[in-house]
Amino acid sequence: MNDLYLKTATEQELIDALPFARGVDENGVDIWVTATHDYALDIIGDVYNKDGVYDANGEVITPPTKVAGFHANLRCNDIVAMLVPQSTIIIPPPNTPTVEFF
């Protein structure tokens, strides 16, 4: 299995990069297909730095800054990994992932 940490500028760019992970629900709405026998996809979306400041009650004093881009994690077999554009796999495994596959 391959663990790919994906980042694009926008969600639409990720949609364009992963057309195999798109489907349509019973109402005709486009959706992410997040799991098959070949892959598991975790759409993260926006990621924020740990630079926010909070008071003792957890209320935001200064909000954290957003990391540029739209993020997702993909665990997949070799065949699916070959379908993912290399330009989309631009980040190494995070030192402190917020989502992990088990």
Image: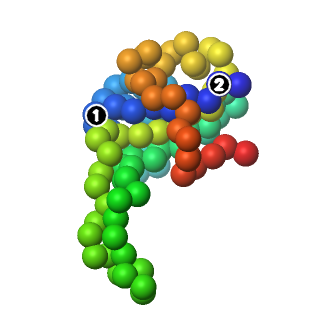
The residue that appears at 62% across and 14% down in the rendered structure is 79
Q: Closer to the camera, 15 or 67?
A: 67
Looking at the image, is 82 positioned above or below residue 10? Answer: above
13 sits left or right of 99 in the view: left
- Residue 9: give its label: 1
- Callouts 2 and 1 close, C-beta under 8 Å: no
**Residue 102 in picture, x, y percent from top left:** 73, 45
Identify which amino acid the numbered label 1 is placed on: Ala
- Specify the amino acid type for callout 2: Asn
Residue closest to the eye, 92 or 3: 92
Q: Is residue 24 visible?
A: no
Q: Residue at x 45, y 47 (%)?
A: 44
Q: Please provide percent x and percent y for residue 56.
A: 42, 85
Spot occupied by residue 1 in the image (x, y as percentages of width and height): 71, 25
The residue wearing badge 2 is 2
Of residues 52 and 86, the one drawn nearer to the viewer in this rendering: 52
Q: Quadrant of residue 19?
A: top left
Position above or below: 14 against 59: above
| Vertical placement of residue 25 versus 9, above or below | below
User: Which residue is pictured at 56% across the width and 46% down the height?
Assistant: 97
**Mark 1 element type:** loop
Which scheme is used to colour this image of the protein? rainbow
Q: Which mark is residue 44?
A: none
Residue 7 relative to residue 79: left or right: left
Label 2 or label 1, whichever comes before in sequence order: 2
Query: In the picture shown, does residue 93 fall above or below 45?
Result: above
On the rendered structure, is 97 left or right of 78?
left
Would residue 43 be visible to someone looking at this image? yes
The crowd level at tag 1 (other Cα within 10 Å; few <14, some 14-19, many 20+) is few
Instruction: Please give the name of the residue rendered at 51% of the width and 28% of the height, measured from the top-left corner.
Output: 92
Q: Return the x and y of residue 30 as percentages of the image width and height.
A: 38, 42
